[in-house]
Image: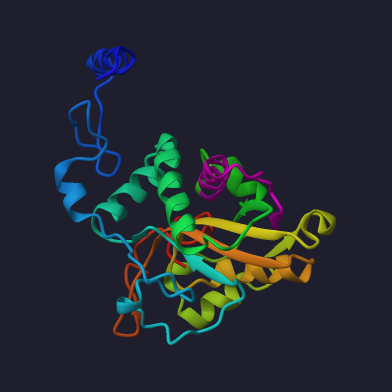
Amino acid sequence: MKPESKISVLFDRLLCAFFPRRCVYCGRLIVPERTVCEDCAANLPRITAPVCSFCGCTKADCTCKQKKLKFDAVCAPFYYEKAIERAVHRFKFEDKDFLARPFAQEIALAIHRDFAQQPFDVVTFIPFTKRQARSRAFNPSELLARETARALSLPCVPLLEKLFETETQHHLSQTARTGNVFGVYEVKDAAAVQDKRVLLIDDIKTTGATLSECAKVLKIAGASSVHAAVFAVAKKKKGKTAHGSSGSGENTGSGKGL
């Protein structure tokens, strides 16, 4: 080991003596050399290639029947279950904003895997209303977008705005969810969108309604393409979206599934 590497390890250990390291996903105390505990590492529900570009699931798990939404494709590193469900809860509802960076690094890896041939001009995110911004410590979608943009060396620009509050999505059927976000979003500045290849970031995808609505208005404003990337995708089981009734979802501000 190089001398500078040894110094770095010693410094890391010293730092951990005062600020013990915790697992990124469950928050359990871990040794300084790790970022994830053994239990979480063994149970991370990773999405593996080949991936369905319509729903973001591994093709072997796909049940979407290639239902076409307004975004060009979607990708994610994880399914919304097990350790990832716990991690998202810590991020969004325990205000662990520092988790945005490791989550975004995983999103960036999924983008490199699934969108390797797709160049992007700008990264953006699902916005809050002004009321939501005042009532919440941070917008999870925005934090993830900014960290993902940093990882990809791309600009992150708030291209969208949310015009008014919507009903909590997790009580609604899939059809009702689509109607619930219809007309809710608009582009701030069409000139900033014109002919741009947009990467749209959110935390969780369930039905895809919010991502699709945002992609639609971006394309109407002149975006040449809109690809979506999220931290986790909820699987559909027996005609229902897994965790759709209780999990965190595409960014409605309520933290509920969409």
Q: Quadrant of residue 184?
A: bottom right
Where residue 68 appears, as percent x and y from the top left, is 55, 82
Residue at x 59%, y 58% (from the top left corner)? 200
- Of 65 and 133, which appears nearest the observer? 65
Where residue 31 appears, as percent x and y from the top left, is 18, 28
- Residue 257 visible from this viewpoint: yes
Give the farthest residue toward the right: 191
Q: Is residue 56 above or below residue 64?
A: above
Residue at x 63%, y 58% (from the top left corner)? 119
Inspect the magenta stretch and tell me whether residue 130 lies in it.
no
Where residue 141 appears, as percent x and y from the top left, is 53, 50
Residue at x 28%, y 19% (from the top left corner)? 19
Q: Is residue 172 above or below residue 153?
A: below
- The span shown in magenta is 141-163
Where residue 176 appears, as percent x and y from the top left, is 53, 79
Give the farthest residue toward the bottom: 65
Q: Quadrant of residue 173?
A: bottom left
- Residue 164 visible from this viewpoint: no
- Of 88 and 183, which appears nearest the observer? 88
